[in-house]
Amino acid sequence: MSSLDQGFKTNSDGSVDVYFGPKAPAGMEKNWVQTIPGKGWFMILRLYGPLEAWFDKSWRPGEIEQQL
């Protein structure tokens, strides 16, 4: 998934929920990154032109939350 992808769903506040797992949640296929069962994975966040809030640490990405 990248910001160049078309069709991902955004929340009313402009944020985007991204789902990681072997199967996409129903209706969230465009917001899903496939993982392989039994294999480890890690996430990298790349920011281009971050704003002052990144540097003064008043903004940070949300925690990864498990959805069942």
Image (spheres, rainbow, N blue to C red):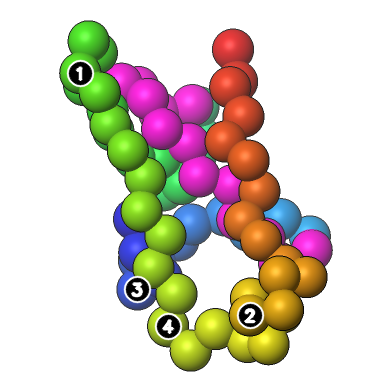
Q: Which residues are magenta?
A: 13-25
The disc, 1 or 3, on the residue closer to the chain's N-terminal end is 3
> Alpha-carbon distance for marks 2 and 1?
34 Å
Q: Is residue 49 above or below residue 31?
A: below
**Where the N terminus falls, by quadrant?**
bottom left
Q: Is residue 68 left or right of residue 18?
A: right
Q: Position of residue 10 (x, y in %)?
A: 63, 58
Q: Is residue 35 left or right of residue 68?
A: left
Q: Secondary structure at mark 4?
A: loop
User: In the rendered image, which residue does mark 4 sit on?
Assistant: 48
The disc, 2 or 4, on the residue closer to the chain's N-terminal end is 4
The structure residue drawn at horizontal position 66% and vertical position 48%, both measured from the top left corner, is: 62
Q: Secondary structure at mark 2?
A: helix
The disc, 4 or 3, on the residue closer to the chain's N-terminal end is 3
Can residue 39 be found in the magenta stretch? no
Q: Residues within 10 Å of mark 4 (few under 14, many from 20)?
A: few
Tell me the amino acid under the disc marked 1: Lys
> Alpha-carbon distance for marks 3 and 2?
25 Å
Number of labels in the image equals: 4
Q: Is residue 64 above or below residue 30?
A: above
> Alpha-carbon distance for marks 1 and 3?
27 Å
Are dots 4 and 1 in contact, CB under 8 Å? no
Q: Position of residue 55 (x, y in %)?
A: 63, 80
Q: Secondary structure at mark 1?
A: loop
Tell me the amino acid under the disc marked 3: Leu
**Where the C terminus falls, by quadrant?**
top right
User: In the rendered image, which residue does mark 1 sit on?
Assistant: 39
> Alpha-carbon distance for marks 4 and 3?
13 Å
Q: Main secondary structure of the magenta part?
A: loop
User: In the rendered image, which residue does mark 2 sit on?
Assistant: 55
